[in-house]
Image (spheres, rainbow, N blue to C red):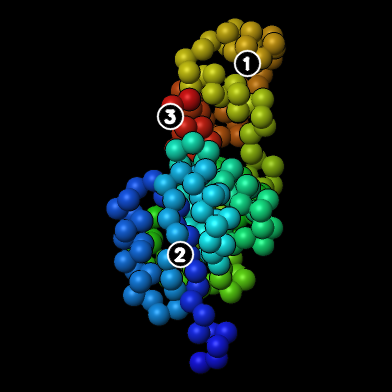
Amino acid sequence: MSDTQAQPIRVLMVDDHPLLREGIAAVLLRQPDMAVVGEAATGEDAVEVFERVRPDVVLMDLVLPGIDGVDATRLIRRQDPKACVLMLTTYRSDMQAWRALKEGAVGFLLKSSLRTDLVDAIRIVAAGGRWVPGDVAAEVSALALGEALTERELRVLQGIAQGFSNREIGELLSLSEETIKSRLKVIMCKLKARDRTHAVSIAMSRGIIRPQL
């Protein structure tokens, strides 16, 4: 083995669940070509630890306290445009995955497949490859082709999730009630939703909006 090959892949783990971080660390510690060089529980901490340890691979949870994994990825890549960030996601269909790709993430790892895919995924992205499970890739491709909601449509959807009427949402966005109705029809078409309640349910399950909204 050459000196270059002997250098371990240095990994930074970012997740707000200590047990998950411990589980990942236990797996990586058994790999002779990997080393855990840092941990973070928030997006802000992830940015700070990255700057300090400069890992080869960042395992970044999408949903974090404070700034989320997408924004943390953006800030990290502002520090280092070549930073290698592999996102951890719970959902097979998640709009946040599309956002993360736009910010430069090299792939996604489903938490349900950590036992089988974690080590291979890290090795592949550390070597310059990408890791996107097929079922996630299909959703990301659809969003990348223009199916993503616009910023205005997201705000309408968030208003619905908060229980506002079309008139109230229109007042908040300085739009007419008819315009809100029109935008809602577009939202339901894009999400293939039956009604406004179904649209909110789909959006939450895909990570388009979060329950606290």
For label 3, the crowd category at 10 Å Cα-Cα, with few meaning under 14, some 14 to 19 and many 20 or more, is: some
Which residue carries the number 3 mark? Answer: 211
**Label 1 with label 3: CB-CB less than 8 Å:** no
Q: Residue at x 63, y 15 (%)?
A: 181
> Quadrant location of residue 189?
top right
In three-dimensional space, the C-alpha distance between marks 1 and 2, rounded to whole angstroms, equals 51 Å
Above or below, comparing residue 169 to residue 144 in the picture: above
Mark 1 or mark 2, earlier in chain:
2
Toward the bottom, the furthest residue is 1
Image x and y of residue 4, in percent = 57, 84
Q: Residue at x 36, y 62 (%)?
A: 24
Q: Residue at x 48, y 25 (%)?
A: 213
Image x and y of residue 151, in percent = 66, 29
- Quick one: SS at disc 3? loop
In three-dimensional space, the C-alpha distance between marks 1 and 3, rounded to whole angstroms, equals 23 Å
Above or below, comparing residue 146 to residue 78 in the picture: above
Q: Nearer the viewer, mark 1 or mark 2?
A: 2
- Quick one: SS at disc 1? helix
Which residue carries the number 1 mark? Answer: 181
Mark 2 or mark 3, earlier in chain:
2
For label 2, the crowd category at 10 Å Cα-Cα, with few meaning under 14, some 14 to 19 and many 20 or more, is: some
181 and 2: which is toward the camera: 2
Mark number displayed over residue 37: 2
Above or below, comparing residue 68 to residue 34 in the picture: above
Image x and y of residue 27, in percent = 34, 68
- Quick one: SS at disc 2? strand
